[in-house]
Image: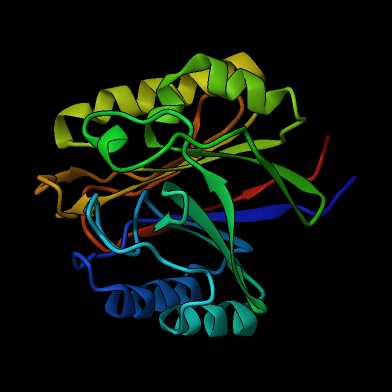
Amino acid sequence: MRAPLTIAVAQPPCISHDVAANAVTHAATVRAAGARVVVFPELSLTGYELAADLIDPGDARLWPVVEACADTGALALAGAPVAGPHIGMLAIDGEGARVVYRKQHLGGAEPERFRPGPEPVVLTVAGWRLGLAICRDTGVPRHAADTAALGMDVYLAGVVHEESELAEQERRARRVASEHGVPVAMASCAGATGGGFDRCAGHSTIWAADGSVLAAAGPETGAVVRARLSGHR
């Protein structure tokens, strides 16, 4: 037995290139989420702006998120362009931020700026092994399989999809849940996020291992939903 884990998926408003403003919004979301782990969309700290400046984990602009995590005991998984350059996922807690995962499967114009990440990652939090993914990773079955081979208990992803891609977003999540027998949580951007994404899909969702929906947001910007995962192995 292990303690249950509460996970939240968030779709906060995003201002392109404005890391300071987005960090303040992330911090407010963490405080409101009531969750041990809060997952944010791909490139949530800069918007989906492939030319955005790289973010160093020690950037002082991230301090509001660090403080929010310290006050709530939460871990925030936020999207940012990072050194490499890579499309990265930052793990932010009360002690600071670190790059915890780098997107492996790039799409569209991304390879013109970024390198693919080197390997799948599982992050352990409170005895739970969290498999990490960013957007297109979720559409590559080998990615989930390689992550599952590391021993994951839940698959977490930050994504940016157009409204027309909502059905695909749901299909990918249910496939991962079905093939690997784990819950899946996707934080999906809502509203505008730059890079030509003026109306994103939203509908951030947490699915159980059987593919049923545990919690789901709508298309609105600013929504955050949570689910409590059982500690039974």
Figure check: 134 above or below 73: above
Residue 36 lies, in percent from the top left, at 64, 63
* 9 lies left or right of 14: right
Please state the total of marks drawn on the protein image. Answer: 0
Residue 64 lies, in percent from the top left, at 46, 84
Residue 32 lies, in percent from the top left, at 46, 74
In depth, the one of 195 and 224 nearer the eye is: 195
* 11 lies left or right of 35: left
* 116 lies left or right of 184: left
Q: Residue at x 63, y 82 (%)?
A: 70
* Residue 45 image-quadrant placement: bottom left
Figure check: 46 above or below 189: below
Give the quadrant of the N terminus: top right
In depth, the one of 7 and 65 nearer the eye is: 65
Figure check: 151 above or below 27: above
In depth, the one of 63 and 57 nearer the eye is: 57
In depth, the one of 119 and 115 nearer the eye is: 115
**Coloring basis for residues:** rainbow
Q: Residue at x 42, y 42 (%)?
A: 205
Residue 60 lies, in percent from the top left, at 46, 84
Q: Residue at x 61, y 85 (%)?
A: 71
